[in-house]
Amino acid sequence: MISYNTHIHKTSDKWVTFVHGAGGSSTIWFKQLREFKKYFNVLLLDLRGHGNSKLHLKDAFMDKYTFDTITDDIVEVIDHEKIEKSHFIGISLGTILIRNLAEKHPSRVESMIMGGAIMKLNLRSQVLIRLGVIFKSIVPYLWLYKFFAFVIMPNKNHKESRLLFVREAKKLYQKEFIRWFRLTSEINPLLRFFRSADIKIPTLYLMGEEDYLFLPSVRQMVQNHRSSSLVVVKDCGHVVNVEQPLFFNETVIKYLLSKK
């Protein structure tokens, strides 16, 4: 089982589950934890190969990496903790896992908060991935990760997010990075399906106005999904919870409390 931590509220029976992106860990939510603990039970996960979950690599996670198997890791935890239903908050690739979980187990998802959501790869993103496929076995993965982080988060005000993710990525193994990178082979059909299917679960997208790679497709998709809404965060790039934490916390908590 992947590594996780829970923070139990004295009176609330509502759960919030945080799902980080590739190369991160549960520590990227450090600017959220204090505020969300005031209102909800909180579940923080380290995805396989990330954070403390990398300690279990040799025994549990040597099977093929797919979005389904990684999603099943999350379901295993909420089953173990007897969490029947939760709000899910994700960032970057974590939003794909949450959306996949909602497809497979809609009764377990109360709402979805999608920060820096990836719902389509534009031409620039696809070129980046192809370069990564070519060089992943011959170039140190950290060089690739730093390059990707700079392309996704290029501005001066994105520096904190960039450094945070690079710092977390240093804790990955080269082989682990390659396993996650291979997930890109199945990402396009999955995202195409997500964009076409309105799952009818309340969904809030929080996207930085400077998230040039991913904001345009989310803006277009939300127009066709009745249960979805979009908040564009000013002066912000891809990692909205790190760059604009006060706005992120206030907006998300208000949204979740309205769902009671």
Image: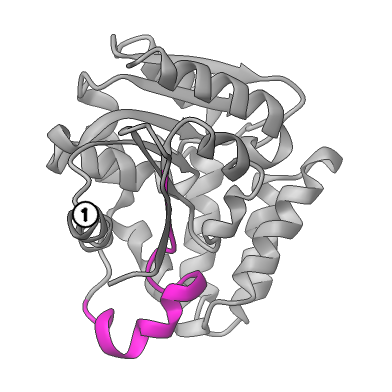
- Residue 251 or residue 81, whichever sits in front: 81
Coordinates of residue 136 in the picture (x, y in percent): 51, 76
**Label 1: which secondary element:** helix
Segment tinted magenta in the rendering: 42-63
Coordinates of residue 92 in the picture (x, y in percent): 50, 44
The residue shown at (20%, 60%) is 80
Vertical relation: 58 (above or below) 228: below
Q: Amino acid at mark 1?
A: Val
- Residue 238: image quadrant is top right
The colour scheme is one colour
In the picture as drawn, the residue positioned furthest to the front comes out as: 10
Whether residue 31 appears in magenta in the rendering, the answer is no
In the picture as drawn, the residue positioned furthest to the right comes out as: 156
Compared across the picture, whether 220 is left or right of 75 comes to right
Return the residue at label 1: 75
Coordinates of residue 54 in the picture (x, y in percent): 44, 79
Vertical relation: 138 (above or below) 228: below
Compared across the picture, whether 103 is left or right of 36 comes to left
Vertical relation: 252 (above or below) 123: above
Coordinates of residue 242 in the picture (x, y in percent): 68, 42
Query: In this figure, what is the number of numbered marks?
Result: 1
Q: Quadrant of the C terminus?
A: top left
